[in-house]
């Protein structure tokens, strides 16, 4: 029995972090889901991007469950997003 069996057998809610990367002109938002490295989507608005993120996460969970693979635990408390500042040489 793995650590994820309670998630799979009891249907509990699990929260995941998503990263929204806006296009330079803000015409769309690309979505990355760190807990599911192959899950990528996008939307024209933040709301649409988040809705698509929910769909892709649900599809990833469904696919993993069907293949008998574990569902990743929530990364809300463990995922760290930090900012790194570097100097760019003058042109």
Image (cartoon, rainbow, N blue to C red):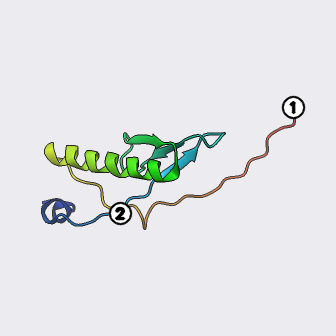
Q: Position of residue 15 (x, y in %)?
A: 35, 63
Badge 1 element:
loop
Q: Which mark is residue 91?
A: 1
- Residues at circles 2 and 1 in contact by the CB criterion of under 8 Å: no
Q: Nearer the viewer, residue 27 or 30?
A: 27
Q: Residue at x 79, y 45 (%)?
A: 87
Q: Nearer the viewer, residue 54 or 75?
A: 54
In the image, residue 34 sits, relative to residue 3, either above or below, namely above
Around disc 2, counting alpha carbons within 10 Å, would you say few (fewer than 14), some (14 to 19), or many (20 or more)? few
Q: Residue at x 39, y 47 (%)?
A: 52
Q: Which mark is residue 15?
A: 2
For discs 2 and 1, the disc positioned in front in the rendered view: 2
Q: Quadrant of the C terminus?
A: top right
Toward which corner of the image does residue 11 lie, by quadrant?
Answer: bottom left
Q: CA distance from mark 2 to mark 1?
A: 44 Å
Q: Outermost residue, top direction?
A: 91
Q: Quadrant of the N terminus?
A: bottom left
Q: Outermost residue, right direction?
A: 90
Q: Is residue 81 left or right of residue 25?
A: left
Q: Which mark is residue 5?
A: none
Q: Nearer the viewer, residue 70 or 13?
A: 13
Mark 2 and mark 1 lie on one chain; the one further toward the N terminus is: 2
Q: Residue at x 64, y 56 (%)?
A: 83
Around disc 1, counting alpha carbons within 10 Å, would you say few (fewer than 14), some (14 to 19), or many (20 or more)? few
Q: Position of residue 26 (x, y in %)?
A: 62, 43
Badge 2 element:
loop
Q: Residue at x 39, y 43 (%)?
A: 37
Q: Position of residue 66 (x, y in %)?
A: 14, 44
Q: Position of residue 22 (x, y in %)?
A: 59, 45
């Amino acid at each position: 029995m793995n650590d994820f069996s309670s998630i799979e057998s009891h249907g509990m809610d699990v929260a995941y972090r998503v990263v929204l990367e806006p296009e330079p002109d803000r015409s769309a938002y690309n979505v990355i889901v760190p807990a599911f490295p192959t899950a990528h989507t996008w939307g024209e608005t933040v709301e649409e991007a988040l809705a698509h993120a929910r769909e892709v996460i649900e599809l990833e969970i469904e696919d993993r469950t069907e293949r008998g693979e574990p569902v990743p635990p929530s990364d809300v408390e463990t995922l760290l997003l930090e900012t790194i500042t570097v100097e760019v040489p003058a042109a």
